[in-house]
Image: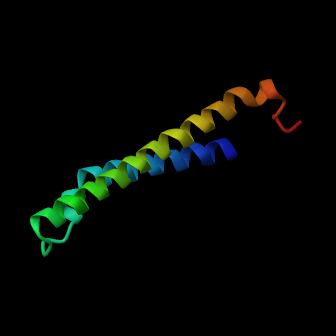
């Protein structure tokens, strides 16, 4: 159950990060100056990349728990 939750959270975080990186330009308000828009867009892309990295980490942790669980005696028996 915990493995599935970790993998599901990882997929969700990765998807949100991918969406954020693709749509960063459209999420910045047009009322900002050009320099302000660029700075805000860069910040959004950085946050979205962080989401993607967190998603990969969650998926890897889920897979590691699935693979190493029986080896480490974490099967719950």
Q: Is residue 70 left or right of residue 3?
A: right
**Location of residue 76 in the rendering, given as x and y in whole percent from the top left corner:** 85, 39
For the point 30% across and 58% down, the residue is 44
Q: Quadrant of residue 71?
A: top right
Count up the numbered dots. Answer: 0
Q: Residue furthest front?
A: 35
Q: Residue furthest right?
A: 77
In the image, is residue 58 above or below residue 48?
Answer: above
Q: Nearer the viewer, residue 42 or 76?
A: 42
Q: Quadrant of residue 65?
A: top right
**Location of residue 8 in the rendering, given as x and y in whole percent from the top left corner:** 54, 47
Q: Is residue 68 left or right of residue 46?
A: right
Q: Nearer the viewer, residue 33 or 51?
A: 33
Q: Is residue 14 left or right of residue 72?
A: left
Tell me if I can see residue 1 in this picture: no
Q: Residue furthest bottom?
A: 31
Quadrant showing the C terminus: top right
Tell me if I can see residue 32 in this picture: yes
For the point 30% across and 57% down, the residue is 43
For the point 68% across and 27% down, the residue is 67
């Amino acid at each position: 159950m915990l493995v599935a939750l970790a993998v599901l959270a990882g997929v969700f975080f990765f998807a949100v990060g991918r969406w954020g990186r693709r749509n960063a330009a459209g999420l910045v308000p047009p009322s900002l100056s050009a320099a302000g828009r660029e700075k805000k867009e860069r910040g959004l892309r950085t946050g979205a990349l962080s989401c993607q990295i967190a998603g990969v980490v969650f998926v890897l942790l889920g897979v590691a728990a699935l693979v190493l669980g029986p080896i480490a005696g974490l099967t719950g028996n």
